[in-house]
Image (tube, grey):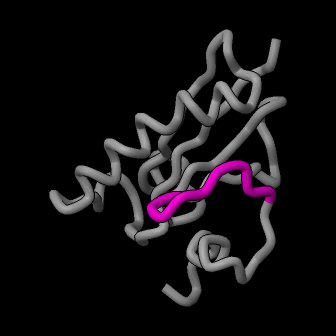
Amino acid sequence: MTDCLFCKIAAKQIPSGIVYEDDDMLCFKDIHPAAPVHLLLIPKTHFDSLAHAQPQHQELLGKMMLRVPQIAQQAGLSHGFKTQINTGKGGGQEVFHLHIHILGNPQ
């Protein structure tokens, strides 16, 4: 999607504070953090939200969920962290590209 902010970040058209990247996903610092550590993990494949996930996204979503604790650990959140997926306008989603918020306070 050419007008999607997160697709542009994944394509490196917009700079971001990348903390993790592989072939399938990208994690970067939120520009309006709601916690001392506030990261966003996005798939490089665009789909609007968790409600738009299809069976072909199952493996990707599993990889992302398994990567979250590793990213949190590397960010200093060894004592715990919060994950959040906002889905749709009613769920507080502002950017319509699936993303997982990783939030916490390093000890």
Across and down, in percent, residue 2 comes to 55, 89
66 or 46: nearer the viewer? 66
Across and down, in percent, residue 7 comes to 56, 75
19 or 4: nearer the viewer? 19
Q: Is residue 40 above or below residue 44?
A: above
For the point 49% across and 45% down, the residue is 86
Q: How many discs mark residues in the rendered view?
A: 0
65 or 53: nearer the viewer? 65
Residue at the farthest bottom position: 2
Q: Is residue 9 above or below residue 73?
A: below
For the point 52% across and 35% down, the residue is 68
For the point 32% across and 42% down, the residue is 62
Quadrant of the frame with the C terminus: top right
Q: Is residue 91 above or below residue 93?
A: above
Left or right of 49, for residue 95: right
Q: Is residue 88 above or below residue 84?
A: below
Left or right of 59, for residue 78: right
6 or 60: nearer the viewer? 60
- Is 24 a magenta residue? yes
Span highlighted in magenta in the image: 17-25
Q: Quarter of the image holding residue 70?
A: top right
Q: Quarter of the image holding residue 80?
A: top right
For the point 37% across and 45% down, the residue is 63
Left or right of 12, for residue 99: left
Across and down, in percent, residue 45 comes to 41, 70
Across and down, in percent, residue 101 comes to 59, 41
Q: Quarter of the image holding residue 48?
A: bottom left
- Is 2 a magenta residue? no
Residue at the farthest front position: 22
